[in-house]
Image (tube, coloured by chain):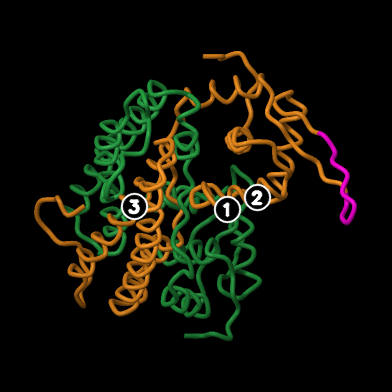
Chain colours: A green, B orange
């Protein structure tokens, strides 16, 4: 599994993966990410350019300049065989830890008893609305992908997002039933999660 | 709703919220976060100290030095009435966007067709194991909270995490059935999400 090979952060491998779709400039890369993997991987543009340079240093990508008559010259990046091998090694190595939930919603909810039941119900209603909108957008992409066909893994990332959004909607519906003026934890045995 | 008040990043409000549990040093704050809200909010220690200074500058917290005989003096922070008001305003303002999924797992999965079915099944198996472990840990906390009682909102953040982890386990079970040597998107109408 290439334990002794050069290691790089996940973002570098993500960029490497995008280059398997074909040679790209930094700008092309930004657009390709937005149109595909962007929902769960949205590095800053400056970081993407830094990773492209790192890939060249590691020998995982080649860089060439393309002259342009009406604009500044652009740099085009191509994955190398060493890059393809590094990518496969990384793909075969699961992340050491479960995905962090970085949630502006949960940070607020956690302190909800300081704001009262009405504020908490408002937070939950808006979160539910956002999850529903996401679910609808995902549903349209799903229909499109199933008509168009293609490799399964990107499709699975979509069904993952749909499961997540649907779980949020269900949770919102259950949570708001638990909110009364007292806002105390329901007693008794568990199973509300 | 205080639209014209000073604004700060979510992390500042999170720190403010923690100070409602009582006065704290930076060290106390780190420990209190680890033992409660840490799963979905884990700012760097340096950031926490910076936010404490910001709260003092904004007049949302007071700082005092406490002499210690055997160690360096420590600074203790207390929330002010202006801080309590700012916190309530923030709690009543839902986040503008849905929570980002920042997922080392999904970045790998997305490119899974480059690594083959076996690597993808391995990724999914490990992700499922991590989700199960999390679900078990959450279940123990849930039992404890239901016996102990307390305000509902922190309990709801727990059931949110449980819904999420359970959704991941279910998704893993469905996804691995879709993986065959061809690894193509199943054709026909949707509804697999």
- Distance, label 3 to label 1, CA atoms, is 18 Å
Q: Residue at x 29, y 74 (%)?
A: B121
Q: Residues within 10 Å of mark 2 (few under 14, many from 20)?
A: many
Q: Which mark is residue B30?
A: 2
- Please state which of residues A182 and A50 is positioned toward the viewer in this rendering: A182
Kindly identify which residue carries mark 1: B34
Whichever of labels 3 and 1 marks the residue nearer the N terminus, that label is: 1
**Magenta span has B88?**
no
From mark 2 to mark 1, how far is it between C-alphas? Answer: 6 Å
Nearer-N-terminus badge (2/3): 2
Q: Quadrant of residue A173?
A: top left
Tell me: residue B154, above or below residue B103. above
- Between the C-alphas of marks 2 and 3, the distance is 24 Å
For residue B162, which numbered disc appears in the image? 3
- Report the side of A24 relative to A181 (left or right): right
Classify mark 1: helix, strand or loop.
helix
Secondary structure state at the residue bearing disc 2: helix
Range of the magenta residues?
A: B64-72
Q: Nearer the viewer, residue B6 or A114?
A: A114
Which percent across, then down, holds residue A89? 46, 79
């Amino acid at each position: 599994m290439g334990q002794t090979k050069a290691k790089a952060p996940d973002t570098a491998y993500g960029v490497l993966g995008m280059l398997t779709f074909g040679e790209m400039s930094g700008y092309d890369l930004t657009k390709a990410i937005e149109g595909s993997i962007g929902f769960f991987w949205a590095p800053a543009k400056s970081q993407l350019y830094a990773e492209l340079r790192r890939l060249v240093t590691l020998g995982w990508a080649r860089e060439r300049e393309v002259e342009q008559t009406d604009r500044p010259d652009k740099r085009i990046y191509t994955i190398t065989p060493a890059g393809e091998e590094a990518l496969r090694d990384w793909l075969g190595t699961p992340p050491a830890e479960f995905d962090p939930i970085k949630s502006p919603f949960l940070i607020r909810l956690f302190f909800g008893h300081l704001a009262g039941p009405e504020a908490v119900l408002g937070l939950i209603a808006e979160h539910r609305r956002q999850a529903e909108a996401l679910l609808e957008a995902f549903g349209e992409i799903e229909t499109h992908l199933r008509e168009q066909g293609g490799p399964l893994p990107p499709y699975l990332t979509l069904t993952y997002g749909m499961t997540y959004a649907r779980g949020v909607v269900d949770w919102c519906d259950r949570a708001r039933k638990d909110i009364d003026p007292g806002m105390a934890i329901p007693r008794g045995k568990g199973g509300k999660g």
